[in-house]
Amino acid sequence: FTGGYAVHPLTGEKVPIWVGDYVLGSYGTGAVMAVPAHDERDFEFAAKYDLDVKWVVEPAKNKKGKRPELNTEEAFTNEGNNMNSGEFDGLTTAKAKKAITNKLNEIGKGGPKVTYKLRDWVFSRQRYWGEPIPIYFPVDFPEGVDPATVDPKEDGCEHEIRFDQPIPVDEADLPLELPVMTDFKPGDDPAGCLARAKDWRYFQKDGKWFARETNTMPQWAGSCWYYFRFLDPQNNDNAFSSKVDEEWMPVDLYVGGAEHAVLHLLYARFWHQVLYDLGYTKHPEPFQKLVHQGMILGTDGEKMSKSRGNVINPDDIVSGQGADALRLYEMFMGPLEAVKPWQTSQVAGVVRFQNKLYNVVKAAVSNENGDEMDEETTKILHKTMKKVTEDIESMSFNTAISALMVLTNHLGTLKGNVPKEAAEKLALMVSPIAPHIGEECWSMLGHDTSLAY
């Protein structure tokens, strides 16, 4: 107990000020209003030091209109209705928060405020691969030592790098390139492996010694704006031209996992906002639409991890059943956004579909009746074309594949009378999902060029 008191802004009551080691000094102002009755840590603190516990929230009434009894032996942390709160008695927790905030705003002692909490972004890595950070520092030597007579690159040369005096590399000297190194293992030096490249690290300028920063930038330095560079990769004068920015940006669709939302996507937007403010892009936002793809779990229903031994290597599927089978199965597992467990045994199902499709096209090639198509086949073909088109647009690949399976099964019942037109449309529709078999079937049907163009 500090011996001091704070005055409650609404009631005027004196509130004792305590110092508690469970309060995070880096969170907010470092000072919080403890509510022992409704916070577990505050309740434990109050019990230990025999502090008053004032109950200001009671359980809400149940469906039968009865209010459960308040248990004062532990903190009540659920939402409910205000009690012992004067004019705010009876209000639900949500309404009470708004009413109290508005009251504080009216009397000039508080008000609403939005606080954003971000994860710290450490923009440095102690590794070789990465963009060198274009900063260097002065090097000091013991008093009386002439810098012209010493070389900090030599072992035993006493010197101090003044990290408190960073100097940016002149723009004319950019880009700063990594030194050629044959050994870039991390080593024991916390400054990273670049600290061992002394000829690169230390240099003289105007008769003085300087030392380069040996940390490198993280992969975010490039991935935060890679979508711009992809548009103009051969441009040696600019990161990207205003012409490609105007013609191609912003990105129409971004597909990524939810785990990217608080790192890559967030910082890519920060980076984009800077480029926008500096006038490098005309577009205030980088991505027009975002789709979060679901995670594929191991066969045990858990997140794939080497420690669990449940990692599926896609190369094994490709070498055994082919890349098309892998693509078909991944997209047929369920909705794109859903979390789905991997089942290797089910890959055989899409392999059978591939074989059926191939045989259907093969039958169409040898069909002497050519393009004769009955009414039922025409209807199923057109329905499938509509369904697959809409599903691919909405990224509902599992239902698109299902529709293709239905069409393939129907064409298989026609035996040797598979219309060539239907087979061509089938090859075209399957190609975005299984491009290899799509191209193979297209070639079997007599086309000399790729169906992709």
Image (cartoon, grey):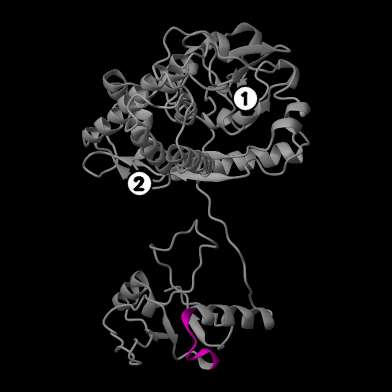
Which image quarter holds the C terminus? top right
Residue depicted at 41% across the width and 78% down the height: 79
Q: Amino acid at mark 2?
A: Val
Q: Residue at x 52, y 14 (%)?
A: 447
Q: Report the magenta residues as a range.
A: 87-93
Q: Nearer the viewer, residue 31 or 406?
A: 406
**Residue 59 percent across, percent down from the top left:** 36, 85
Q: Is residue 236 left or right of residue 16?
A: right
Disc 2 target residue: 339
Quadrant of residue 211 in the image? top right
Q: Nearer the viewer, residue 43 or 217?
A: 217
Q: Are marks 2 and 1 in contact (CB under 8 Å)?
A: no
From where the camera sits, is residue 265 visible?
yes
Dot label at residue 285: none
The residue depicted at 58 percent of the width and 39 percent of the height is 253
Q: Is residue 218 left or right of residue 320?
A: right
- Crowdedness near tag 1: few (<14), some (14–19) or many (≥20) residues, C-alpha within 10 Å: few
> In the drawing, what numbered circle is on residue 230?
1
What amino acid type should be assigned to the residue bearing mark 1?
Answer: Phe
Quarter of image, res 132: top right
**158 lies above or below 330:** above
Which of discs 2 and 1 lies nearer the camera? The answer is 2
Above/below status of 136 relative to 58: above
Image quarter in which the N terminus is found? bottom left
Q: Give the CA separation, mark 2 to mark 1.
A: 30 Å
